[in-house]
Amino acid sequence: MNRKNWILGSAILLSLGGCYHFVPATPAAIPQGTPVRARLSTMSNFELSQITVNNIDLVDGEMIRSDAESLFLSATWLQAVTGNGYAGNGWTVEIPDANVAGFEEKRFSFWRSGVVVAGVMAATWFGFDALGLTPTSGGGGGGTGNTQ
């Protein structure tokens, strides 16, 4: 594989990292380990290992389980009302059902992925073309370049 194809392939793979969206879901229907987001109706405090994070209104994480009273997530990110965010580092957080204003499942978006991949391919191609690294389509001829 030549260098140009390797760069193009790498650019496409890197562009797929952000091609996700969140869709409304029901906690009871989500299997364990699925990436989810919980929006909280009131600000909450969570103890993560040695620290307590305050004024949290959004929790990203993986679903652990849900029962009649609470939602249990392995937190990856906790967002505070103040704009500060905290890495959850996989710590388990318990959110009372009464405090869950919205619950969403993270899903791969084929539409966004297609648009991003097409854009990255076009930008890469035109970048190589501007640098003169694309294959030319013939023409030229065998002349010496002397004109009279």
Image: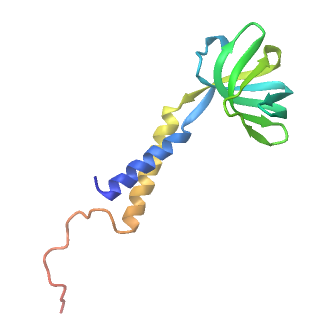
The answer to whether any part of residue 29 appears in the image is yes
The quarter holding residue 31 reads: top right
**Colour theme:** rainbow
Q: Position of residue 29 (x, y in %)?
A: 61, 12
Residue 12 pos. (x, y %): 43, 46
Q: Residue furthest top?
A: 68
| Residue at image point 42% right, 56% down | 124
Where is residue 38 drawn, in percent x and y? 72, 25
Q: Determine the residue positioned at 48% across, 32% down.
A: 110
- Name the side, left or right, on which 43 lies relative to 127: right
Front one among 85 and 11: 85
Residue at the image point whose x is 39% and y is 57% from the top: 125
For the C terminus, give its image quadrant.
bottom left
Residue 95 position (above or below residue 10): above
The answer to which image quadrant residue 32 occupies is: top right
Residue 111 higher or lower than 74, as above or below = below
Q: In this view, does 2 lie above or below 55?
A: below
- Look at 81% across and 37% down and name the residue there: 80
Q: Is residue 26 visible?
A: no
